[in-house]
Amino acid sequence: RRGRPLDLPGLATALARLSARSLIIDAELVACDAGGRCDMSALRRALSRGDERSLVVRCFDLLDLNGRDLRDEPLHKRQMALAKLITRARIPALLLSEGFVGDGAAVLAFAEANRLEGVVSKRRDASYRSGKTRDWLKIKTEHWRQTRAPEIAKSIERRNRARDKQKGRPS
């Protein structure tokens, strides 16, 4: 996220087993708690210890495969190609974030009940575009906004004070 390289030889070896000469996947590195939910604190701990056992790569989209730019293809076709690639590889550290068509309010209620961060909704027929577009929407759950957002704000404030102190600025 901050452009720092990660030394994760186990994951690198696993990703190299994918049947492709080259690829670009839209994904995130996560650590999961015992219930299977993503846990940012667990991710930070695992990375600081160099412990890859709890880390997984959650894959959302396939942008390029073997030098073929797929970004203009509709989302559902890119995700089908990604699913095929991941299913064939049978790599436990790679998880496909599967999309489904359904009632958005019900999905958000499920996310809220399971204390998830939120829901990302995307148009099935949309091409891939970097940054915010009208083709996707991220909605945070109320639980996340009330509990995690204040924690993150405090963490950012502490980091900024420490940086200012290092630079000799008043806090």
Image (tube, rainbow, N blue to C red):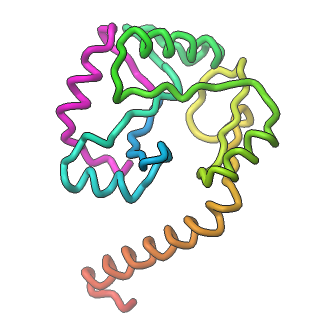
Relative side of 78 to 9, left or right: right
From this view, report whether residue 79 is shown above or below residue 110: above
Q: Is residue 13 magenta?
A: yes
Seen at 69% across and 31% down, the residue is: 122
Residue 106 spot, x, y in % from top left: 79, 40
Seen at 42% across and 45% down, the residue is: 32
Q: Is residue 12 magenta?
A: yes
Seen at 60% across and 29% down, the residue is: 129
Relative side of 13 to 146, left or right: left
**Hey, which quadrant is residue 143 in on the image?**
bottom right
Seen at 21% across and 46% down, the residue is: 51
Residue sitting nearer the eye, 166 or 100: 100
Residue sitting nearer the eye, 87 or 163: 87
From this view, report whether residue 90 is shown above or below residue 13: above
* Count of marks overlaid on the render: 0
Residue 145 spot, x, y in % from top left: 65, 64
Residue 155 spot, x, y in % from top left: 43, 72
Residue sitting nearer the eye, 155 or 118: 118
Residue 120 spot, x, y in % from top left: 65, 39
**Residues rendered magenta in the picture:** 1-25
From this view, report whether residue 141 is shown above or below residue 5: below
